[in-house]
Image (spheres, helix red, strand yellow):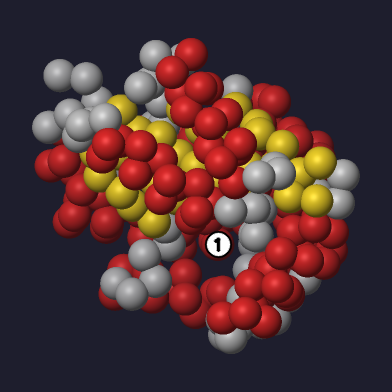
Amino acid sequence: MRKTLIAIDGLDGSGKRTQTELLIEYMKKNGIEHRYLSFPTYDKSYSYYVNMYLSGVFGENPETVNAYAASSFFAADRYCSYMLDWKKDYDEGKIIVANRYTTANAVHQLSKLSESEYDTFLDWLYDYEFTKLGLPKPDAVIYLSLPPALSHNMVDKRCAETGAIKDIHEKSVSFTEKSYKAVLYSSAKLGWHRIDCNTGDKMRPINEIQEEIVRCLKENSIL
């Protein structure tokens, strides 16, 4: 039985949730068996350490917690979710669509390291999550790319409209800039499908981005 996992990731404000939910709607309309996931789980007990980290319990500077320790928090959340929630759906052949996945560690945590350490960390991360923990490896990664300045503008807009409170990643301009550098490296090294979500200082139309996502997945025989 074919097992398929699609990961959709991107910097804060890039539209990950919107695009993931639109892809789910496409699958519903076309009768494609699927399961929608969103990481971190936040409302589950197994995301306890993730919530501590993002809320600033360890410190307001993301780099207070090193890349390997922070990656372990997020990986444990995914592992518990997999074992207790969606493993059966995955094994039965439903297409799993994840809003964020291991890919988020390959960007945000990678950004804490010097460029000379990038390969060592990425090799460790993929071996840790996909071999040692046994989590499914994505069959396709769609990365919604957004320049740091526009990422911050979109987060500011969202917080103003919803009253949401920024986590320690979203608060730091320098962290976002380093994460963008990590995006460019990881997407090239790991073969992600990177989609530019802006034209200049403007966001591209939502439906246009979704059409590109679906086209990409079809061309790579995922859908």
Residue at x-position 76% and y-position 44%: 198
Residue 108: name its quadrant: bottom right
Res 102 seen here: no
Of residues 142 and 68, the one drawn nearer to the viewer in this rendering: 142
Which residue is drawn at the image coordinates 81% and 41% (left, top)?
199
The picture quadrant where one finds residue 129 is top left
Please identify the quarter of the rendering in which residue 39 is found. bottom left
Q: Residue at x 20, y 48 (%)?
A: 86
Residue 18 % position (x, y): 50, 54
Q: Is residue 49 left or right of residue 85?
A: right
Q: Is residue 176 left or right of residue 161?
A: right
Left or right: 212, with 217 as reference point: right
Residue 166 image offset from top left, x and y in percent: 64, 78
Q: Quadrant of the C terminus?
A: top left
Q: Is residue 213 above or below residue 71?
A: above
Residue wearing tag 1: 70
Q: Is residue 81 above or below residue 32?
A: below
**SS at mark 1 in the image:** helix
The three-letter amino acid code for the residue at tag 1 is Ala
Seen at 15% across and 33% down, the residue is 91
| Image spot of residue 52 (x, y percent) | 49, 79
